[in-house]
Amino acid sequence: MSPATTDSTRERIIDAAEECFTRFGVAKTTVEDIAAAARLSRATVYRSVTGGRDELILAVVLRDLRRFLDRLAGRLRAEPSVPEAVVEGTMDAVAYVRARPAIAAFLVPEAAGHMQAAVAQGAEHLLAVCCEYVRPHFDLAQRRRMLRPDIEVEGTVEFLFRIITSLIVMDRDRDPDAQRRFLHTYVVPVIAAP
C-alpha cells in the first residue's frame, strides 16, 4: 500500500472488486471496472493496489475468509467434542462459501486460472490465517488428549483446509445427514483420538 493510500480507499477498492467479481465474474473483471465501481481513477487504483487484480482477488478472499473464521472460532469455543467441531465446522465452511457469491465466483471453471495465480502467490498466507484462528482450539484439544497423539496441529489445520476446499469444489450432492456421516467416517478418525 502506498503512503498516499488510506485504509478507507483500499477498503473501497476491495468492496468494488468484490462487487465486480460477483457481477461480471473473475475472468471478465478489469481494473477499469473496479475503478468505475469504486468511483476512483484507474491511476488511484493502480497506486493503491500495486499487485493489480491478483492482489485484489487475494484481498477479497482473505477478507471473506476472516469473516468466516471469526464465526468459526466462536463455534469451536462452544463445541465440546473434537468430532463435532470437525464435522460441524466443515459443514459451516462449505455452506458459508457456497452462499457467498464473491467467493463462489472464484470456484467456477472460468476463474480457475485467475484464482490459481492469485491464491498460489498467497496460499501460505491463506493457510497461516486459518492456522492463526484455529490453532488455539486444536492446541487445547491436543493438550486434553482429544486429538490423535501422532499428529501435529499445523498439519491438522492444513488437512481440514484441503478437505473443505475439495468438498466445495467437488459437490457430490449429498444431503446434510449423508455429508455428516461421510465426515464422521472418513475425516474424524484421521484427527480425533480413539
Image: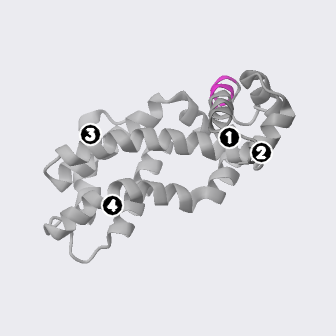
**Closer to the N terminus: mark 2 or mark 1?**
2
**Closer to the N terminus: mark 4 or mark 2?**
2
**Closer to the N terminus: mark 4 or mark 1?**
1
Q: Which residue is mark 4?
A: 135
**Residue at 24%, 57% in the rendered image:** 188
**Closer to the N terminus: mark 1 or mark 3?**
1
- Chain part drawn in magenta: 18-23
**Tag 3–tag 4 contact (CB < 8 Å):** no
The quadrant holding residue 82 is bottom left
What is the spatial separation of the Cα atoms under label 4 and label 2, in whole angstroms? 31 Å
Q: Which residue is mark 1?
A: 111
Q: Which residue is mark 3?
A: 178
Q: Amino acid at mark 2?
A: Gly
What is the spatial separation of the Cα atoms under label 2 and label 3, in whole angstroms? 42 Å
Label 1, secondary structure: give it. helix
**Residue at 23%, 49% in the rendered image:** 85
